[in-house]
Every structure is written in C-alpha cells, then in structure tokens.
Amino acid sequence: MVLTLVEHDSGAVDDNSLEALTLAREVAADAGEALEVIAFGPEAGGIADEVGAHGAEVVNVVDHVDLDDYAPEAYARAVIQCAKETGTEAVMAPGTDRGSEILAHAGAKLGETMAAEVTAVDVGDTYELTRQRWGGTLIEHSDLDADTNLLTVAPNEVSASETGDGPAAVSEFTPELEDSDLRVQLTEVEESDVEGVPLAEARVVVSGGRGTDGDFSEIEAFADYLPNTAVGSSRAAVNEGWRPHDDQIGQTGNKIAPEIYIACGISGAVQHMVGCKGAENILAVNTDPEAAIIQKADWAVTADLHEVLPAVTDELENRGHS
C-alpha cells in the first residue's frame, strides 16, 4: 500500500497535497498497491470527496486528544504507526515545510532515508527517483530501496489530476504517543497583514530588487492595472528592509509558478531563480544587458525600471484597463 500525507485547511485540501497524491497514485498503480491518505484533525473526514476524486481509497483520520496543535514528532509517530498497521511500502508527502518536517522525523525514527523534492518515480526492484537538488538547478537520478520508502514531492512540478472516482472511505486512526513526541508543539500562528492575491496563487507576479532603490510605488501602481497580480521582491530588497520577508521570492522565500513573472531591477542570482523557475514566462527589466536575469528571461527590456513602468502604466490607464 502507498500512504500519502495530505494537508488541509478545514477540509479544503492544499494544492501541493493534490500534486503529491497524483504522483502517489501513479506509484501505487505501478506497484500494484492500494492508495490511502493520512490526514490530521477532526475535520479531515471532510476531504473524502476530494481525495477520492484523485484516486485515494481510504482516508485515515488522525484525531487525538493531544494533537489539537501541530507537533512534528507526534505527527511523524502517527504516520509511522499508520504505515505499519496498513502494511505500507511507501509514504509520500507534499514537499511543503510541514510535509518535509514530518517525513524527516519519520525517517529519523525509522532509521530510513527520506528522499526530498521528487518529481518522478519508476517502480521496479527499487524506486528509481528523479528529484531536484540545489533548488532545482540540478536534477538527480537515484535509487531508493528501504523497508518503508519515504519521499516528498517537489511543489509545482507535478500536475494534479482527478480520476473521477467517488469519495474515499473514512477510517479513524488513534496513534499511541510518547511524552517526548509532544516536546515541540505549535503554540501560536502570526499571520501577516497581506492584501490582494497571494504570491503562490497569482497568475502574474511583478517583482522588484535592488534596482528599485527602495521605491516600490511604481511596481505597485503597475500591478494594480493587471488582473490577478501580486507584488514580490528579491532577497536584496528584503535585506535592505524595503519589503517584508513574505514578499521574498527565492530559495529561502516563496516559490512561484505564474503565467508570467516580471522581474524589475533584479540581477537574477541562482537563489532567486530557484524561486521563479516555475514561471511559464519571464520578462526582465534591467539596465544591465549582462545581468543573469536578462540571459534567462523569455523577454527582456534593457532600460531603467523607473522609466519603463510609469510609461507602461500610463498606457494602460489611457487604454482604460483596470
């Protein structure tokens, strides 16, 4: 059996979890195994329709008196026990912060290797993996052979797809936890005051870097004229205190996959490109024709963003776009 960890918000499944579930479905089919899901919280039963439509046969709902809040070691203990009870040969999870943390703890407890950032699996005598390294700048081919194969699926690299199946069956699972499993728990969530479209969901992202000189007003004015658009930034802009970390795109920030990414005054360091490599198209605006972002972009404007963006914004305004 193949077990997939699914994250959800009040019964709405996270997109990255649906991507992981899609790849897990392919692995289960190739291995001739059933596909089940493990999800946490009393509302997890509400995902039965959605995960069933993506091929899962059973939702194992973990509802424990000590798990009102996220506790990574306890979650890992629950995953291990559920995998053992269901005879799991592989546990897969989305490559999110939480999915990666849980499977890393599970690997440590089992003494098994956890393979991260997987994009494809060929099932044979071993699991032949294709996975990303160094934020996607290197593609690795490797074999994974363990009693329980643990792997996370790289976000935004697998297209989620439905099978048209009916709802999954719901099964309650109560793990046996140790006191040490609860030594680290989530105690508070502090949400930033974000308005508009989240970076991860935007069809268009307009981003600024050191070339803005700290003035993002022209970028924000331009973005206001484009539908479903979010404003991002480079790490340099965040380090200067010009933008909050929530806006940062890159290896240590957000990973985005818009239809078009418009990078203004950004050099295009490798760490930044890791965050925007999922974009279908990249348009770069930079005064330096030798900048790395210019070389990697689909389109480029070699000019000062402070001249280009106001001119384009004025043209959009004249044409009546809003």
Image (tube, helix red, strand yellow):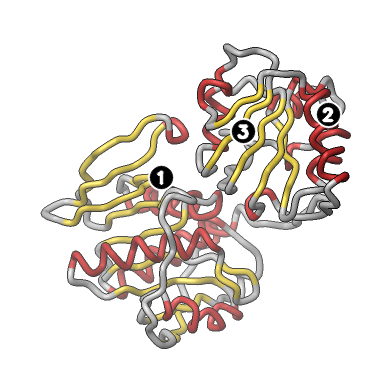
CA gap, disc 3 and disc 1: 27 Å
Q: Residues within 10 Å of mark 3 (few under 14, many from 20)?
A: some
Q: Which mark is residue 84?
A: none
Q: Nearer the viewer, mark 1 or mark 2?
A: 2
Relative to 7, 130 lies left or right: left
Q: Which mark is residue 242?
A: 2
Amino acid tagged 3: Leu
- 154 shown above or below 51: above
Q: Which residue is mark 3?
A: 283
CA gap, disc 1 and disc 2: 31 Å
Residue 205 x, y percent position in the rendering: 68, 43
CA gap, disc 3 and disc 2: 22 Å
Residue 50 x, y percent position in the rendering: 49, 78
Amino acid tagged 2: Trp
Q: Which residue is mark 1?
A: 117
Out of 195 and 91, give the one closest to the viewer. Answer: 195
Relative to 100, 205 lies left or right: right
Relative to 20, 226 lies left or right: right
